[in-house]
Image (cartoon, rainbow, N blue to C red):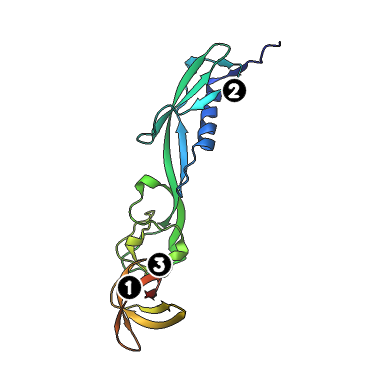
Amino acid sequence: MAEAATDVYTTEELTALVQQWLDSEQQHTEQSERQWQVQSLDARIGQKECQHPLELSLPGQLRNRQTTVQIRCNAPAPWQLYVPARFSDVIEAVVARQNLRPGTPITAEMLQIEQRERRLLRGTIVTDPQQIIGARNRRSISLGQMVSLEDLCLVCRGDIVTINVNHATLNVSATGVAEQDGSLGDLISIRNRQSNQLIEAQVIAVNEVQVRY
């Protein structure tokens, strides 16, 4: 029987193999992407030989955004290496393209989408710029800062808003004046412009609220 062919790997090739394996096998799935940075193997290790496909695995748990990848070979002579790697989970978030003073009406030109580390997120981060066009910021937002819903009022006190009423098969709309600031999902007081009555409604979009029964 012919002897199995022996593959020879340099340290650079082994490092690249680990990077490729992590990128393909360890993707994050919760609305973010996991990016890996593999530590290069010491060149003094020299070349490694193996007659079978290399076995890669994570022998330990992921802790503090770090792990170690094990490379194993069983023939012609068994050997194994451990390669340190770090990761970060990144998500696409809306960030400010300029400094924004409180009360600034938000326009598309003021925003852009960038990748940021998930661990740095604070509050409910905005991922779609269209969701907040026309809103105003409650506090200062700095150039490059991620925009959160908590920074904004989609409906601000004194705004004229559309009131949507959904009850069974009844769908009607009216206009009102906001008595409070509100962000997405907040329940705020609205004064109906026709009846002058105060109602409680949920903010569903910029200058738009909904009454549910």
Q: Residues within 10 Å of mark 2 (few under 14, many from 20)?
A: few
Q: Which of marks 1 and 3 is in front?
A: 1
Question: Along the horizontal axis of the image, is 197 left or right of 96?
Answer: left
Which residue is identified by label 2?
53
Which residue is identified by label 1?
156
Question: Along the horizontal axis of the image, is 89 left or right of 153?
Answer: right
Question: Is residue 31 depicted above or below 39 in this figure?
Answer: below
Query: Where does the image place residue 21, in percent across and percent down from the top left?
Result: 53, 32
- Identity of the amino acid at label 3? Ile
Query: Where does the image place residue 2, in percent across and percent down from the top left?
Result: 71, 11
Give the distance between the C-alpha atoms of the residues marked 2 and 1, in whole angstroms.
62 Å
Q: Can residue 42 be seen in this view?
A: no
Query: Where does the image place residue 55, in percent across and percent down from the top left?
Result: 53, 24
Q: Can residue 9 be seen in this view?
A: yes
Label at residue 106: 3
Question: Along the horizontal axis of the image, is 160 left or right of 54?
Answer: left
Give the distance between the C-alpha atoms of the residues marked 1 and 3, in whole angstroms.
13 Å
Extreme-bottom residue of the structure: 194
Q: What element carries label 3?
A: loop
